[in-house]
Amino acid sequence: MPTIGDVAAAAGVSRSTASYALSGKRAVSEEVRRRVEEAVHRLGYTPNAGARALATSQTMVIGLLARFLEDEFAPAMMQYILGVSDTARELGYDTLLVTEADGVRALRRITGSRMVDGVVLLNVAHDDVRLPALREAHQPGALVGLPGDCSGLDVFDLDFEEAGRVMVERMHRLGHRELILVSQPEHVAERGGAYMWRLRDAALEQARLRGVRLHAVSGESGQPAIGATLHRLLDDHPSATGLLLNNEAAAAALPSVLHARGLSVPEDLSVIGRYSDEFARTFSLPYSSIESAPDRLGNMAVRHLVRRIESPEGREKPHVVRFISPELVDRGSTAPPGPRGR
């Protein structure tokens, strides 16, 4: 395999100059940088991660702790993972994806052995057992998801409370007075998935303030169970004219359910979901939705984390808690109440 010495010889510069041109640690002329980059491409040179870590105390790797849980819809989780890994790659970092069930042990292993320069956590619970270990680590950490205690960490999340209010308010303004809200499985709440009850509780309160009857239920995370639940809900609440979905599996199953029942959107039933635009395209969903922005959240978390990693001043700055305001993407699936409400 080619070495940095081979690159330097091919570019006609010293070994140190070639290293500076690649690392950006010192200024070099554009001509020298161009020659070094051409030599790198021609030789197929890849920096040795171990040597780089010894020289700079950086691995250029970000740890990503995520779990594929049975009660969550896996395609939705993948979008958060891609949001983190794509931004890390753009900034010159590799991503070490860790999916162990014992997140505390995994976190201590990768931080204690200095395998990573920083850590991003997904699947964040209200009382997340991984947070004390992350606070104790030498490396900085960032969370995609809101825990009960945010101290000592940077936190990024969708404003789920406002999302619940926006969904109900949109339906109320159109004249809907009875709605169904399908949330994530109850197990999500039981293990501390605060995003579920944050949206549900805010939606219920907004419905109470507006005089809207809201049936809030938990749904399953896969077929055929979620399809059967949607059928049952529509049977149990025949006067409901709007459907709110905080459950990606329910959104993906809804087209076939409505087709089987001969219902049209928005003529018979108005629908608003909570998922990303990419998710809507993947499953060909024609429903208006609150953009969950997994790519943007991952981007924000990684960029903030890298600033802490690379800047001594960044390590000392106060930690932040930042929410993305909900954006309602109108795909034409809401209208004044149709035949079900007459």
Image (spheres, helix red, strand yellow):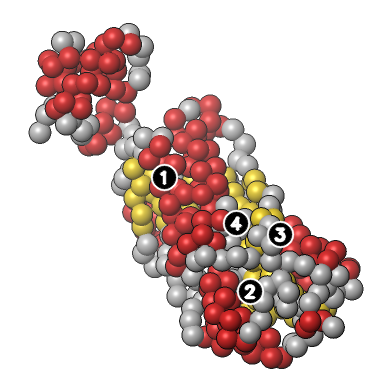
Q: Which residue is mark 2?
A: 183
Mark with earlier residue (3, 2)? 3
Do the numbered discs 2 and 1 sit on residues whose CB atoms are within 8 Å? no
Badge 1 amino acid: Asp
Q: Which residue is mark 1?
A: 86
Task: Depth check: give the residue in front, 90 or 333.
Answer: 333
Do the numbered discs 4 and 3 sit on residues whose CB atoms are within 8 Å? no
Q: Is residue 55 visible?
A: yes
- Where is residue 162? Give x, y as percent: 74, 57
How much space separates mark 4 and mark 1, taking CA atoms?
17 Å
- Where is residue 293? Give x, y as percent: 57, 52
Say above or below: 26 vs 148.
above
Mark with earlier residue (2, 1)? 1
How much space separates mark 4 and mark 3, taking CA atoms?
9 Å
Quarter of the view holding residue 58: top left
Quarter of the view holding residue 11: top left
Q: Which residue is drawn at the image coordinates 10% and 33% (left, top)?
A: 1
Q: Which residue is mark 3?
A: 163
Q: Which residue is mark 4?
A: 292
